[in-house]
Image (spheres, rainbow, N blue to C red):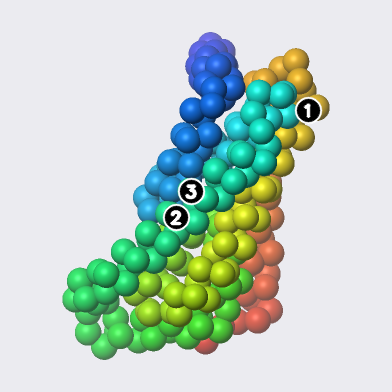
Amino acid sequence: MTAAILGALFGAFFDRLSELSGSPLFLLVILLIAFADSVVPVVPSETLVIVGGVAAGQGEQSLTMVMLCGALGAFLGDNAAYQLGASAEGLLRSTMFRGDKGDRRLAWAARQLARRGGQLLVTARFIPGGRTAVTVSSGVTGQPRRRFVLWDLLACAIWASYAALLGFVGGKTFEDNHTLALLVALAAAVGVTVLVEVVRHVHAKRNPPDSQP
């Protein structure tokens, strides 16, 4: 009974998304949600980009515009998070990073970002919450803005393209069933996230960074 109720609720939710996803305003929703998710990592931006991709696969949206809106929203949000970290550096140092231990933690983060900040920006885009941690930390530790912008452009373009294409393929494959197309695309997205985490974990074990204080 519970499974049937949950199935009905999810079905209704996805049907509602299906109705909204064909609207031109849905592109603006994708942009705004992608922006918000970069600053407050509790908003399902990836889901919205995938939904847009499904709609594109079924001829209701432009795949190019879905990618552009997702990437632009994410890029603007990441840079807002960077600026937040840079502007609130003093406050964060006096609250979250107080004393010698806090100084050592920030120094460690600065070394990691300086050595492989580009790689971290790209991989963190696929880890919920990770993207905000990396972007804010980049601002707090004073990473070069130009390098941050260039790598973040690449990261956001890859992220938006992959999410939109997952939805697009699902929409093309299941043209007569929007809900099934979305579920398949979301399952594939979860699989990619898990794969990224596994690869990152294995790489970290084989190539350990400096010990974190």
Q: Residue shown at 39%/86% (left/top)?
A: 107
* Mark 1 and mark 2: Cα distance apart in space: 30 Å
Q: Amino acid at mark 1?
A: Lys
SS of the residue at dot 1? Answer: helix
In this view, 40 is above or below 97: above
Reading the image, the residue beneath label 2 is: 76
Residue 115: x and y in percent read 56, 84
Residue 74: x and y in percent read 50, 52
Instruction: Tell me, for residue 73, which label it has, or none.
Output: 3
Residue 66: x and y in percent read 61, 39
Which residue is outermost to the right? 173
Work out whether mark 3 precedes mark 1 in sequence or the reverse, and give the earlier one: 3
CA neighbours of label 1 inside 10 A, class few (<14), some (14 to 19), many (20+): some
Q: Are marks 3 and 1 in contact (CB under 8 Å)?
A: no
Reading the image, the residue beneath label 1 is: 172
Horizontal side of 75 relative to 140 (left or right) equals right
In this view, 93 is above or below 31: below
CA neighbours of label 2 inside 10 A, class few (<14), some (14 to 19), many (20+): many
Give the image quarter of residue 67: top right
Work out whether mark 1 precedes mark 2 in sequence or the reverse, and give the earlier one: 2
* Mark 3 and mark 1: Cα distance apart in space: 25 Å
Residue 14: x and y in percent read 56, 21
SS of the residue at dot 2? Answer: helix
Q: Residue shown at 20%/71% (left/top)?
A: 91
User: In the rendered view of the protein, which quadrant contains the C terminus?
Assistant: bottom left
